[in-house]
Image (tube, rainbow, N blue to C red):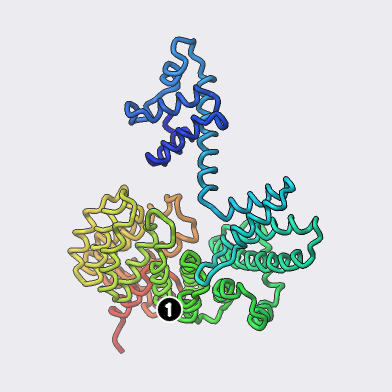
Amino acid sequence: MNNSALLQILRKLDKTELRELESFLNSPYFNKNKNVTALFRFLISPAHENLQLITNRDIHNFIFKRKRFSNENVKTIIYLLTRLTEKFLVIKGSEKDDGEFNRKLLKIFNNKGLDKHFKRHLLKTGKPEFARGEVELDKISRKAEFEKTLLQYYLPRNEENNIFAHEIKLSEDLLAAFLVDMFKQFNVFWRAIYLNNMVDVEFTSVILDSIDLEKLFSSFSKHNYRYVLLVKPHYEIYKLLKDDSGIIDIENLISNITGNDFISGNEKFVLSTILVNTIYYKRLKSGSSYTKELFEALKLMMEFYKYSGEQFLRYTTYSNILRIGLQLGEYEWTEEFIKKYHILLEDSIKDNMLIYSNAYLAFTRGDFEKCLEYESKINFQTFQQRYYLRDLRLTSLYELGKFETALDLIDSYKHFIKKDQNYTPKMKQGYLLFLFFINDLIKLKLGMSRKNITEIKEKLDKAAPMRKDWLTIKFEEISPKT
């Protein structure tokens, strides 16, 4: 049963949830098949700690005893238990969502013609309104569904005042949800086009380009549109992607999020994540640095990480903050970041990333031997950021003057990049450019190249390799003094 859907679900349930599921299965309203309940008890038995070793024959022998083995019967029971477990999770999830529960109950009262019950429950539960600091897209979407439920009640009764009042609220909810989703989708498609992953025409840009958004947001402000503080930060990030001036007003972008006491912490985390992605890909496309701006956006994202709902911190996020923080000389801040956040990484990568962090810290402080010593302790086969590790090793070897070893590593690195299936050609380009320039750097240093260093520096200035700042400094160090 190692890869069965049922087994994967049961592994994610804690002891309390398993007890609740057992009670659910014992209810004759939901389940009248005793074999299904028997299968559940069999699977959660302490004697079966290693569920992946259980076979269909084991299940058959336990449930059907001496009857002739039938694999189809076992598969049927597994299917029924899986479906009931999924139903249990849906019901349990619905019970926790008071707003969804109330909306469904109002809809049932309306369908049954229970007007008094409808009005009494509406008065008891209230109409969903948001306090400052609570507004977020998901809640607005749920509120729109609530407004639709009220309209379903008022429309056949011709209560025009209520109809028009709730139509206005519904339209405002839908408009906010539409605009936020459109700005989010534009961000996704913009990146997809940059990475050459768009194969079809996308109409999000067509729609947004056809709207006079400046006029629209001016009208929002003039008429006090109640969701303008939710939509505006998304609009500002959208404008950043559309802007080719090369200027990023990071302070204004951040203040639209941190100083926005209208939206929830969760919404601020979502916005900070979108801002990070926007600056990162804008940086790649333009070839500009934007390092400080990206670092500030990443710090903002970590400020609201507690609202992310994620069990583990993503290693890409962790390593990006680590490298940029050290690149900018933010040593004390980054050391605190390492201590506080490396423990939030998945257990399988936590140790490797801590060693890598110390290696990178040693590199930025000029202790290149210590860097290589740390780097040698990393389990390379399980280290997920093999590209960054090779970059770190190469630059350390260069700094120590171990040029022949570095040239051998460049050759093996090129082969690794060509064979790797995890990165797109567009994503690989920055690493290949890094190898191209560090190869020229070493050969110029050794007197093995006749290339013009001025021309190489001009190419470097226009290109977007990884470790560009480091390469620029190293080329300056070997440039003829004028």
* Amino acid, disc 1: Glu
Q: Could you tell whether 445 is left or right of 262 in the image?
A: left
Closer to us: 302 or 149:
149
* Residue at the image point whose x is 45% and y is 51% from the top: 422
Q: Quadrant of residue 44?
A: top left
**Which residue is located at x 81 percent, y 60 percent?**
158
Q: Image quadrant for the C terminus?
A: bottom left
Depth check: 393 or 82 in front? 82
Q: What is the x, y in percent for residue 207?
A: 70, 68
Using the rendered view, name the quadrant where residue 141 is placed: bottom right
For the question of whether residue 221 can be seen, the reply is yes
Q: Is residue 312 left or right of residue 362?
A: right
Along the line of sight, the residue nearer the viewer: 402 or 243: 243
Point 57% across, 31% down: residue: 29
Compared to residue 171, the image places residue 109 above or below, namely above
State whether residue 448 is above or below residue 246: above
The residue under label 1 is: 458
| Residue 403 pos. (x, y %) | 25, 65
The relative height of residue 11 versus residue 236 in the rendered view (above or below) is above
Q: Quadrant of residue 150?
A: bottom right
Position of the N terminus, as image quadrant, is: top left
Q: Secondary structure at mark 1?
A: helix
Local crowd at mark 1 within 10 Å, few (<14), some, or many (≥20)? few
Residue 159 at what x, y percent from top left?
Answer: 79, 62
Depth check, front residue: 59 or 92? 92
**Camera sees residue 141:** no
Total marks shown come to 1
